[in-house]
Image: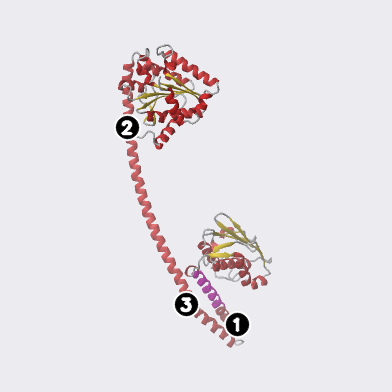
Amino acid sequence: MFYNSPHYLEKVANAVKHVNVHDHICSIYESRDEQLAVIIPFIRYGLENNEKCLYVADENTVEEITGLLSDGIPELQSYMDKGALTIINKTKAYLEQGRFSPEHVVEAIKKNIRTAKQEGYKAFRITGEMTWALSGDPGVEHLMEYESDVNHLYEELDAVAICQYNKNRFSPEMIRHILYTHPVVIYKGTVCRNYKYVPPEEYLSPDAASAEIDRTLVQILEIEKREESLLEKNIELQVINQKLNAEIEMRKQTEDLLLKTLRELERSNSELEQFAYVASHDLQEPIRMISVYTRMLERQLEGKLDPRSRQCLFFLSDGSKRMHALVQDLLAYSRLTSAKEPFVPTDINSVLSEVMLDLQVAITDHNAEIELEEMPRITADPTQMRQLFQNLIQNAIKFKSEADPFIQICCERSDSEWHFSIKDNGIGISPEYNDRVFVIFQRLHEKEKYPGTGIGLSVCKKIVERHGGRIWIESEEGSGSTFHFTISRSL
């Protein structure tokens, strides 16, 4: 394993970052690189977090470890100069009495913690190389008792410690006791809760062997319960997965059915549109013939018909005119699909100028006033834009109130669309009909008073939808109407 690879170092640093005050940790390592991968970020995070740090090196490694720490912590010397970090050898840390005295070491650590807090540091952080314990110094046989008992100190005071143990140097029996005395273990770059940890009360008890048996039996039961729970959860997950798979399969079948239905609807709509186009196109000639012969009859029989016959002839003429208008609107509606023009840069000011000319007679006859804002240049089908505005303005003039028509045309720009509005002071409609006005052949007013085919607004809806937008109306009966529509800016 490459313990100095950037990926490994980043992984370990992130793990060590979550070490907490009050933790008593053993770091089990097998090489210098593995050792430093843990210790450098441990010291660095402490210094950055305003914690006073102490490093206990082996007798002959103080200079070496100082250099290695400097490589990983560029500001190391500055921290050492102001006393935030101290590096000492094993003698000063553990053997000042000429022997290892757990009581003396514990008191020294307590003093360091108190001093750190008095100096304004958040906590005290200590780490030591434990290979000194292999030198056979007097009192070293009490090391594990010390390691167990010191857990009380770290639980109570604002301190955190990592004891560094080289797995290749210490015996398996010693490593076993090291694991018994540290609640947290760092191994292979992972910070772990230590399930082998034995609380000091048990570890230092004269009846430790009996207590270990009881604890082991309890652990066996807990492990068995956890395995049973995991098995139950696994079975539950399998059932859930089966249900999910069935649900996914059902949804897939539903999606396939919807897709098939959509394709059939598209085909049906296409056929209907084609039929409407062909039918309306083919109806033009018969309707024209009816109109021509009706006019001939009117001329030839002028003054010769009784009132009932004149009424019948009027109905025939009026019906042919309405049928002609309906056929023309149907053709226009069909051409929206069959005769699409490409989207090109379109000046809406120019479009509206052309619409005003087309509607000049209606505008003059109804004394209509139209107020225009400066309009944008957009990407659109110019022919359909002309048809859209003409239908909406014509609609505003047609459904006027007793007052002269006043029409306002505005536009707002957003990040994704153009928002146009056409507001009038006409008769308006009840809000309950707001959605129905765009349905083809839908008529909401008396045809005698407001003639028309009921296709105009459905044409507007189809044009707007082709341009990636939506159309809606805001209206109150007797208070005028405002038609809104949007055009996408990403065409």
The alpha-carbon separation of the residues under discs 1 and 2 comes to: 101 Å
Query: Which residue is the site of mark 2?
Result: 227
239 or 7, nearer to the observer: 7
Q: Is residue 18 visible?
A: no
**Which of the image's four quarters has the N terminus?**
top left
Q: Quadrant location of residue 365? A: bottom right
Is residue 417 depicted above or below 391 in this figure? Answer: above
Name the amino acid, label 2.
Glu
Measuring from the top left, give residue 336's x and y in whole percent.
Answer: 50, 68
Q: Quadrant location of residue 460? A: bottom right
The alpha-carbon separation of the residues under discs 3 and 1 comes to: 34 Å
Query: Which residue is the site of mark 1?
Result: 307
Residue 322 is covered by the magenta coloring: yes
Measuring from the top left, give residue 244's x and y in whole percent.
Answer: 36, 46
The region drawn magenta spans 318-335
Query: Which residue is the site of mark 3?
Result: 282
- Secondary structure at badge 2 equals helix
Name the amino acid, label 1.
Pro
- Label 1 packing within 10 angstroms: few (<14), some (14-19), many (20+): few
The residue depicted at 31 percent of the width and 17 percent of the height is: 209
Of labels 1 and 2, earlier in sequence is 2
- Secondary structure at badge 1 equals helix
Most prominent secondary structure in the magenta stretch? helix
Measuring from the top left, give residue 83's x and y in whole percent.
Answer: 52, 23
